[in-house]
Image (cartoon, rainbow, N blue to C red):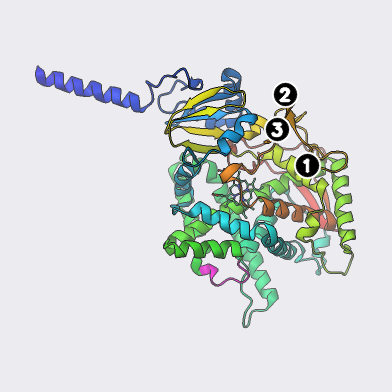
Amino acid sequence: MAFWAAVLGALLVSILGGLYLLGAFRRRRPTEPPLDKGHIPWLGYALDFRKNSAEFLKKMQRRHGDIFTVLIGGYYFTFVMDPFSFGAIVKASRAKLDFEAFAVELVARVFGYHPSKNNHKIIQVSSTKHLMGDGLVVMTQAMMENLQTLMFHNRDSGEGRRWQQDGLFHYSYNIVFRAGYLALFGNEPCTGTQSEEKAKERDLIQSEELFDEFRKYDRLFPRLAYAVLPPKDKMEAERLKRLFWKVLSVKNSREKDNISGWISDQEQFLAELGVPEYMRDRFMFLLLWAAQGNTGPSSFWLLLYLMKHPEAMQAVREEVDKVLGEAGQEVKPGSPVVNITRDMLMKTPVLDSAVEETLRLTAAPILIRAVVEDLNLKMANGREYALCKGDRIALFPHVAVQMDPEVHPEPHTFKYNRFLNQDGTKKDFYKNGKKLKYFNMPWGAGTSICPGRFFAVNEIKLFVFLMLSYYDLELVNEKEEIPPIDVSRWGFGSMQPTHDVQFKYRLRI
Ligand code: HEM
């Protein structure tokens, strides 16, 4: 009898323990944000969130207001939807809200990379040196030269002057990815018997192959990040990871010419910290992903918005021509391709506004911090909420501010000059009559803000600058609507369209 009572007792304890672990007993304390665990133990709202994060969060905001805690796959996420309160989160010290704790897990799953202690610092130091200030001049030039190789290699043969057709998404992503990759990771060597032309040809072939493989990984990425890939796709993701580790390996990079300081410095810093070579290879894959996964899709959206909005296209064209004219350069038959510098790109307020508008509409990262200790979060309206150690706090600025009609009237419409005052200066944005600091957040904010943002903008601008200066562009079906956003990718940076848009292009000169 006593034996069976003990067995029953143990069973009860394990069931209760299991339910506790699944979060079944967690109740909202009065000082905490509204808590919504959904109906499925442990999973909570994981399925709704994964299906369409933006719609899910809008629904929760309507139900609970500007702060709420939801259970998603075993974790409690507190979402803050009031942009006036973003500062308190993105500026909080690492001892309270930690950005790396969450990133470490994700990075291990998707890139097989286990970050070393000073990784974030290494990225920041190298990016400040090579992707900003004087370093940006060098990187912009490298991007320019590689774009020239990719976009004008068939100019002399006359072949480029015939109409060609492609998907605009595929074309833009392909060119911007490959040029950015070559600018950062270096070119095929041009030594000994190899002439410069031969090396360029090999760059063209190798970068094209790499782009094809990258796109395969790109398509698997959201499900890989959520750890929901079926076995066959998991195997494919594993194959691709290994391929990238190999192609981008430290050993292979030693053979390249013109490798950027951004890449070589980071590799060297890690080596000095004693990070083994195989792990440094994996870090290179992470850098490729961070650097090249967003700029191509953003370039596509910008070019498409311009093609669908003739007044915007005309305004940007006029600015491009003016900047070229002021630099004493001309697009004309027989002369070398123009050279667009970082300084020229600093004189393009209209294009800047069009880029920012594109990112407002189509960049949608979710910013996540781990709550390191129990703490009180003070919202901008003065209310305080208790946050629990071990939970996560998250911002989704796309829903919370980028598409808020009060901040950005007619938020679904592309307005190329939305970010400009009449006199060409930058506009301020308001909500409830109060000036907003965080009105557009494609790059995130605070300690985890994208360190490549200035280079990214220059990459996009260079591509569009060259496309508008040298090419005739037409949509195959002029009446085709702008495709919807693929909702399975919310949270991962620049969004992609559900389908491509066919276009025709030919070199004008
Ligand atoms: C349109 C293009 C881009 C967008 C929208 C974008 C967006 C972002 C965002 C939102 C984050 C922060 C994520 C977070 O808080 O968890 C981030 C991080 C990062 N981005 Fe970008 N990015 C772009 C292009 C680039 C480029 C061109 C580079 C480098 C050449 C780059 C390098 C990085 C790196 C290394 C990180 C990780 C930073 C860290 O761990 O400290 N990004 N990016």
**Mark 2 sits on what residue?**
432
Separation of marks 3 and 1 at Cα, in angstroms: 26 Å
* Placement of the N terminus among the 4 image quadrants: top left
Q: Residue at x 67, y 62 (%)?
A: 135
Q: Is residue 265 left or right of residue 176?
A: left
* Mark 2 secondary-structure assignment: loop
Judging depth in this view, the residue of 505 and 11 nearest the camera is 11
Dot 3 or dot 1: first in sequence order is 1
Q: Residue at x 51, y 20 (%)?
A: 34
Residue flagged by tag 1: what amino acid is it? Tyr
Separation of marks 2 and 3 at Cα, in angstroms: 10 Å
Residue flagged by tag 3: what amino acid is it? Leu
Judging depth in this view, the residue of 236 and 334 nearest the camera is 334
**Mark 3 sits on what residue?**
436
* Mark 1 secondary-structure assignment: helix
Q: Quick check: marks 3 and 1 in contact, CB under 8 Å?
A: no
Task: Please provide percent x and percent y for residue 477.
Answer: 80, 42
**Mark 1 sits on what residue?**
305
